[in-house]
Amino acid sequence: MSETREAQVVDTFLALTDTLVHDFDALDILTMLAERCTELLDVSAAGIILADGQGRLSVAAASSERSRLLEVFAVAIDGGPCVDCVRGGVQVLCDDLLGAEAQERWSRYARGASEAGFRATHALPMRLRDDVIGVLTLLHTGPHTLTTEDARLGQALADAATVGLVHERAVRRAETVQEQLQGALNSRIIVEQAKGVLAAHSHLGPHATIGPDEAFVLLRSHARAHGQRLTELARGLVDRSVDPTTVLGVSA
């Protein structure tokens, strides 16, 4: 492992487990996890699905719009390696979704993944002892075998994120695991609405008309540059207390 990659791994683990900071943001942490997976592992994209206390699944974060939509599709059809992983609590690795076994087992998911541009899906459980709170999905655009090293690192990252989320709840005492996870899911809804607000106003800014991915980059960059929590900025855009042109970079 190179010194640069080793430093990235250490930084990622610290961020995932440092729940004592006052501005801990579950959505930001999960988004960071998805993005870091594409940097640290040999994968094209990543997504995270969380389960609530009643077993319902929702997409919490993704590294790109394409991977987010595929995760939404998997939840909608209640099928695919990621759904099987969170239901069973064990890794489900599929090297080629066009293979005979995958076609027989996940035919609808395989078609959706192919349309989204993905050929391989590797699902790693987010689990603390017997409690499975979600799944980290690793995607690749071509047939792909997850190496033993990448599988171990990916699982370790998923475990660290799980511990971080659960421990944050324990530190604050006022929240339960279900409330913490539901908060992340609710935040995702607000962020998706804020992305829509930015996209609708993008013609007012210096950029060409932007899509969901570009809107999220602007949203997150503005929040970090101004020391704001991502969800607070998103909520401000949705309730119109924040002018979208300030996020789009329009001069006064």
Image: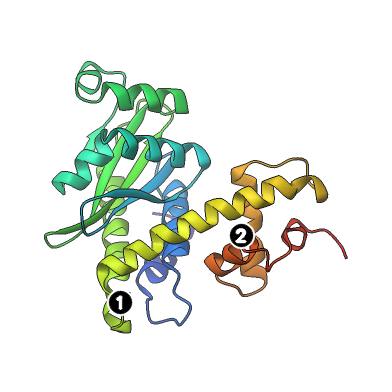
Who comes first in sequence, dot 1 or dot 2? 1
Residue 190 lies, with reference to residue 165, above or below; the image says above
Point out residue 141 in the picture as x, y percentages from the top left corner: 44, 29
> Real-space Cα distance between discs 1 and 2?
25 Å
Residue 70, image quadrant: top left
User: Depth check: 232 or 164 in front?
Assistant: 232
Q: Which residue is mark 1?
A: 175
Point out residue 117 in the picture as x, y percentages from the top left corner: 46, 27
Left or right of 242? Residue 212 is: left
Q: Residue at x 63, y 58 (%)?
A: 219
Residue 172 lies, with reference to residue 9, above or below; the image says below
Image disc number at residue 238: 2
Residue 229 lies, with reference to residue 107, above or below; the image says below
Image disc number at residue 205: none
Badge 2 amino acid: Val
How many numbered callouts? Answer: 2
Q: Is residue 5 visible?
A: no
Q: Residue at x 53, y 65 (%)?
A: 231
Left or right of 42? Residue 157 is: left
